[in-house]
Image (cartoon, rainbow, N blue to C red):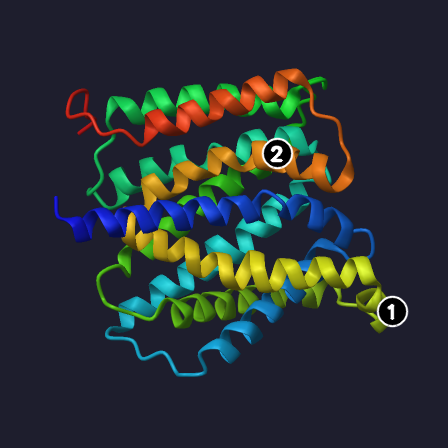
Amino acid sequence: MTGRTLSSAGRGHALALCTVLVWGTTFIASTVALRTLSPVELLALRILIAIAALALANPHRLKLQSRRHELYLLGAGLSGVTLYFLFEYIALTYTSSANCSVIISSAPFFVALAMRFLLREERLNRSFFIGFVVAMVGVSMVSFAGRSLKLNPLGDVLCILAAISWAFYSVCIRKLEGYGYNMMLITRRIFLYGLLFLLPIIAVTGFSVTPADILNTDTLLSILFLGLVASALCFVMWNTAVRLIGPIKTSAYIYLTPPVTIIFAYIILNDPIHPLAIAGAALTLFGLFISQRRTPEAVVH
C-alpha cells in the first residue's frame, strides 16, 4: 500500500469521525427547534439553508456524464434526505430517543448488506460482524443507562426504516464514486431532490412558519447549525469519506452517535452521565475498532 493511499485513508477516517461528532449533537439542536416548528417545517428549512450555503460555496452547474447518474442522485435525495429524516423525526414522536438512537445506530449493518447483495462488491468479514455486535451492546448500554426499555412497534419500525433508507443512500453514493464529480455540487443536487420529494408532504401538512418562529434566538441558532454545519458541511464530508474509505468503514462511525450525544448533552444541557453509559461508550469504541479491522477469513460470499 502506498503512502498516498494511507494518507487518503487517514483523511477518510478523520472526515467520518468529524462528521459523527457533529451529528451526535443534532438531536439536541433538533429538540430545541421542534419546540416551535413541526418536523416537516424543520426539515424544509434545514434543506433550504443547506442548498443556499452550497450554492454560495460553489455556484457552478453540475454536469453529469450519464443520465443514469441523475437517477442515483434522485435516489440519494429521496432515501438519504427526505425519507431518512422524516422517518427519524416522526419516530421520535412515537418512541423514546433511547430506542431511536439504538435502532438507527444499526445502519452500518444494513449498509453492509446493501453493499454486498445489491452491488456485489463488498465482502463482509468476521471482524465486521463481531464489531457490530460489540458496538450495538455498547450503544444499548449508553442509550438505556438509568432508563427502562419501552418498545413502541410503530416508532421502532420507523427507526428501522430510517436505517434502511440510509443504506440505500449509501448505495447511490457508491454508484457515483470514481467519476470525479465535485462533492459540493453532488451534495447540493441531492438536497434539491430531497426538497422536491418533500414538497408534496408540505402541500398536505402545510407550512405555517412565521418570522417570530424563526427569529427566536434558540430556534434560529439551531436551524442555522442544522442547515449550515450538520447538513451542508457534514454531508460533503461524509460523501467524501465514502469515496476515500468506502461506505462500510464510513458508516461504522455511526456507532459513535449515542456516546457523542450524551457527552454533548452533559456539556450543553448539564444532563448527568450514568456510569453504565461510560462503560457503554468504551465498548462502542472497541466495537468500532474491531469493525475497522480486515481479516481474510470467515468472509460471506
Examine the rendering and report whether any part of residue 201 can be seen.
Answer: no
Q: Nearer the viewer, residue 210 or 200?
A: 210
| Residue occupying image coordinates x 45% and y 65% | 190
Which mark is on residue 13? none
Q: Report x, y in % for residue 101.
A: 59, 33
Query: Which quadrant, please, contains the C terminus?
Result: top left
Q: Amino acid at mark 1?
A: Ala
Task: Residue lying at the far bottom in this picture: please name it.
Answer: 60
Answer above or below: position of 51 versus 1: below
Left or right of 90 in this view: 210: right
Q: Which is nearer the N-term, disc 1 or disc 2?
A: 2
Task: Residue lying at the far right in this picture: please name it.
Answer: 212
Answer above or below: position of 163 versus 62: above
State the residue position of label 2: 100
Left or right of 23 in this view: 295: left
Q: Amino acid at mark 2?
A: Cys
